Amino acid sequence: MFEMLIYIALGGVFISMIGLFYRVIKGPSIADRVIALDSIGISLISIVGLVSVLLRTSDYLEVILLIGILAFIGTVAFSKFIEKGEIIERDRNK
């Protein structure tokens, strides 16, 4: 019974990721695309967590942390690009 619930949850997350990929491609604005990319990262974390529970192992906890860090850095980089037009500021006077 518990395994069936995990499979249903995996299916739901997969269906939501299809919608998020659509939002990344067809998003009406760049901000919507950034939010969709961040949500894809969260969905990947949930998929890895559900697979970890399904396999009854804690070996994937490092993967969850890595995906979380990369999703955060990506969101910050895209947000900075939207705000200023560049990610890495360089001194152009030299």
Image (spheres, rainbow, N blue to C red):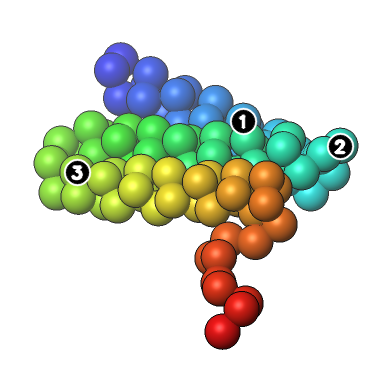
Is the Cβ of the residue at disc 3 closer than 8 Å to that at disc 2?
Answer: no
Residue at screen point 15% across, 36% down: 56
Q: Is residue 2 left or right of residue 62?
A: right
Residue underneath mark 2: 28
User: Which residue occupies the extreme front position in the image?
Assistant: 93
Which of the two residues, 29 or 39, is positioned nearer the viewer here? 29
Residue 10 showing in the rendered view: yes
Question: Where in the figure is residue 64, as x and y percent of width and height?
Answer: 29, 44
Residue at image point 54% right, 26% down: 12
Q: Which image quarter is the N terminus in?
A: top left
Q: Taking 47 as reference, is 1 above or below it? A: above
Separation (CA) of disc 3 from disc 2 = 35 Å
Read off the residue under disc 1: 16
- Secondary structure type for disc 3: helix
* Mark 1–mark 2 distance (CA, rounded to whole Å): 18 Å
Which corner quadrant of the image does residue 89 belong to? bottom right
35 vs 26: above or below: above
* Residue most extreme to the bottom: 94
**What mark, if any, has residue 61 been given in the picture?**
3
Residue 47 occupies quadrant: top left
Amino acid type at image mark 3: Leu
Of the two numbered discs 1 and 2 in the rendering, the one whose residue sits closer to the viewer: 2
Which one is in front, 71 or 49? Answer: 71
Q: Residue at x 48, y 36 (%)?
A: 43
Measuring from the top left, give residue 39's x and y in whole percent.
Answer: 55, 35
Q: Which residue is at the front of the view, 70 or 94?
A: 94
Local crowd size for mark 2, using a 10 Å CA cut-off: few (<14), some (14–19), many (≥20): few
Sequence-wise, the earlier of marks 3 and 2 is 2
Of callouts 1 and 2, the N-terminal one: 1
Q: Nearer the viewer, mark 3 or mark 2?
A: 2
Amino acid on which disc 1 is placed: Ser
